[in-house]
Amino acid sequence: MKILIIEDNKELLKNMHDFLVHEGYVCEYASSFYEAKDKLTAFRYDCILLDLMLPDGNGLNLLEFIRAENIQSSILIISAKNALDDKITGLDLGADDYITKPFYLPELHARIKAIYRRKNLGGDTVVRFNEISVNTVTMEAKVNEALLDLTKKEFDLLLYFLINKNRVLTRQAIAEHLWGDYTDNLSNFDFVYQHVKNLRKKISMANGSDYIGTVYGLGYKFDTNKT
Amino acid sequence: MKLINKLTIWYLAITTVVLLAGAFFVFKSVQREVDGEEIRRLKSLMADAVFNIEKGFAVDSLYNRGIEVKEIDTALPEIPFHVVDTMAWHSQNQGTERTQLASASYKINGKHFLIYARNYGVEKEEITEGVIDSVKWIFILLLIFVIIAASLISKRIFSPFRYALQSIQSFNLKQKEPVKLAPTRTKEFKELNEFLQNMTNKALEDYKSLKEFTENASHELQTPLAVMRGKLELLMESNISDEQANLIMALNNSVEKLSKINQSLILLTKLENREYAALQPVNFTRLTYQVIASLNELIEMKAITLQKEIAENVQVCLNPVLADVLLSNLLNNAIRHNYINGNIRVLLHTSKLVIQNTGNPPEVPTQQLFQRFKKNNQSTESIGLGLSIVKQICDINHFNIQYTYTNNLHTVQIDFHAGK
């Protein structure tokens, strides 16, 4: 999958670039309005990450350009504005989703996957790893074809782990993924612990391997090398 | 009191003074003219008498015309014509009347005659009466016309002023529309309009730059925060020791907190800028159920007993985003500051929302908890802006909010119709 990152902050660009390249994506980047326009005219991308505030032109104008040129990429807006702002204009202009700064990189990854799945309806809607498979359309999770009885949150959590395999997921990142970005109750992470515990238990009971492990002091990790 | 009434009263007061002074001068000059005329008449009367005496008429025959003639010593010098104002008995009127007595002596045909001529003059009272009468009528006419004219003309003259007043009253920074003022040729109103125009334009500009600053500040802070968060995440992936993990986590928590504070402050600033207008009533009942549902897991995790008394179809005029923030913050607080196996009671009526929960007694007076960064327990992870946001939302929507602690219960009560 080919991604174009349009972001003027070099360090943030590097964060996203390094993370996504490590996940196996082909990443290109542009740090200005005109650079982005050039790249968009010359190449095709599956997904575009777009920072709305660019030094030489508003990101929204770029969005209009993308629509005018009928470029069929998924668009994920990176915005400093959150859901409490009057409106996320970008969504009206054909963007697929938006993510608020500061975001967690695994969250960014999950969003890219989600909009990609949504855009490509003919594509694979089942995320698989070894014996575990998760159907994002029917919302069913299976271990060795045995259906897991998961709550909505546990299902989301499992999908989040599967998308961010071998990544350290902090409790904050998990909490924000499950509860949205203005749940102020993140000081109490007991519920993240609770959900992870329940999920692990349910997978084990279905004779699945316990891939999810604790990373000392940091959070959790879906470790593909565990058996 | 209306300006035009004030002006009219002042105008009438000044007119009264002027009319009184004018009446005095009129009185004086009428009297002077009348007197002058009388004196001329007496003079000609006297000249007639002298003429008749010269012609040889008998002195006695002149008496009936108000003339009195006396013969005096020829050695005496001639007395020149002079008039004395005096009071004399008037037989017809049976009373004393003001009388002008003219006297002069003439030497005619070797005899010396002293001639008196008298005249019952016009009295002061009569002139006064006449003057007062006419001044009175002038005043009454003036009064009527001034009052009618004032009410008619003021409508016309003050129309730019009234227009300006109206546009100022309906002026709203959020609408970002400069005030519209009626053109006028009156100097004062021109100055006023100019001032209003400049002032409101300045306010609009300041408001705009403040808003831009808020937005920029948010953007400028969120980006470095995103960088920091990302770097920490990338660092986590590398081979690190437990000690380093602890350091990274501490940093991560601080970034988290910083980001939350930033978002909350931006929200507070926006609230202060009145950026969230209450467009239409929201169904508070449905919203309350939604928020409770979203927090259900947290409630269960703490084994909290939730009591609900929620009236059907409660409509509250409040921006839906703010309604959500309000309910989430209050319920989150009720959960966070609760015991395991505690209680929460949510009561929603058409006019009020009450949220009660068990919890440790507050360490600071409850009303102070609405202040920014004021926390009951300084060591907790919360940032201390949740209740400030709630208070601000209540303030801009004219709700009354109270926080009390009695019988081991924290109670937050919001009256929706307090300000109406």
Image: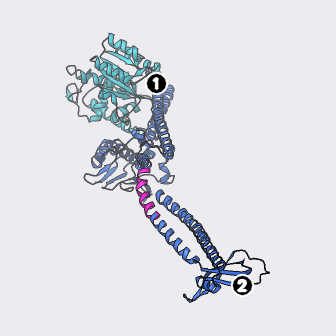
Chain colours: A cyan, B blue
- Dots 2 and 1: beta carbons under 8 Å? no
Q: Is residue A114 left or right of residue B331?
A: left
Q: Is residue B5 magenta?
A: no
Question: Disc 2 designates what residue?
Answer: B71
Q: Looking at the figure, which quarter contains the N terminus of chain A?
A: top left
Q: Nearer the viewer, mark 2 or mark 1?
A: 2
Amino acid type indicated by mark 1: Val
**Height in image: B291 above or below B238?**
below
Q: Identify the secondary structure beneath mark 1.
A: helix
Q: Is residue B146 left or right of residue A201?
A: right
Question: Disc 1 designates what residue?
Answer: B227
Q: Is residue A6 left or right of residue A121?
A: right
Return the residue found at the far top. Answer: A42
Magenta range is B142-158
Residue sitting nearer the eye, B200 or B71: B71
Determine which of the numbered discs, if any, sits on residue B236 in the image: none
Subunit under mark 1: B
Q: Earlier in the sequence, mark 2 or mark 1?
A: 2
Query: Would you call the spot at circle 1 few (<14 residues within 10 Å), some (14-19), or many (20 or more)?
Result: many
Quarter-wise, where is residue B37 in the image?
Answer: bottom right
Q: Position of residue B272 (x, y in %)?
A: 45, 43
Subunit under mark 2: B
Residue sitting nearer the eye, A37 or B195: B195
Q: Is residue B364 left or right of residue A65?
A: right
| Residue B214 visible, this orientation | yes
The secondary structure making up most of the magenta span is: helix
Quarter-wise, where is residue B208 in the image?
Answer: top left
**Height in image: B145 above or below B270?**
below
Amino acid type indicated by mark 2: Glu
Q: Residue at x 50, y 31 (%)?
A: B250
Q: Residue at x 50, y 72 (%)?
A: B133
